[in-house]
Image (cartoon, helix red, strand yellow):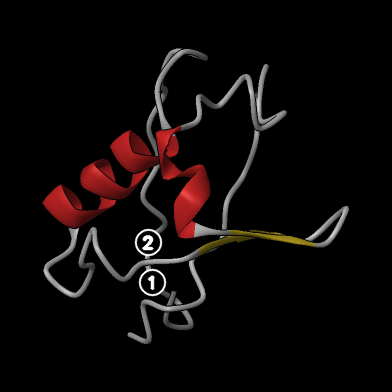
Amino acid sequence: MASGATPNTTTLPSDATLREVAEFLAAQMLSVDVETVTFAQHFPRKTFSRDQFSKTLRELGLTPSAVRTFPSIGL
């Protein structure tokens, strides 16, 4: 996210997939491509792979709540 940019926020059910998160972002921001966006969390440090896009937020340990950063947006 560019410095000073407004964050995109949403609430998704725990059975939503990581791909659904990517699709939400792509619908909000033209610079996001569902096929190339990457996701990372700061603590514990982890980058989510494309293989994990079909997993649910629950399976990935991202519930009941989580904040994601998107390093590949490059705004």
Asked if residue 20 lies left or right of residue 5, the reply is: left
Foreground of the two, 44 or 3? 44
Identify the mark at residue 6; answer none if there is no mark.
2
Asked if residue 49 lies left or right of residue 31, the reply is: right
Point out the image quarter for the C terminus.
bottom left
Check if mark 2's residue and mark 1's residue have beta carbons within 8 Å.
yes
The residue depicted at 42 percent of the width and 23 percent of the height is 11
The residue depicted at 85 percent of the width and 54 percent of the height is 43
Q: Amino acid at mark 1?
A: Ala
Q: Amino acid at mark 2?
A: Thr
Residue density around tag 2, few if under 14, some if 14–19, many if 20 or more, within 10 Å: few
The residue wearing badge 1 is 5
The residue depicted at 41 percent of the width and 29 percent of the height is 17
Foreground of the two, 21 or 60? 60
Tell me if residue 43 comes above or below residue 5 in the rendering: above
Asked if residue 36 lies left or right of residue 1, the reply is: left
The spot of residue 73 in percent (x, y) is: 36, 77
Identify the mark at residue 34; answer none if there is no mark.
none
Q: SS of the residue at dot 2?
A: loop
The residue depicted at 22 percent of the width and 45 percent of the height is 23
Point out the image quarter for the N terminus.
bottom left
Tell me if residue 28 comes above or below residue 5 in the rendering: above
Instruction: Name the residue furthest front.
Output: 51
Asked if residue 44 lies left or right of residue 49, the reply is: right
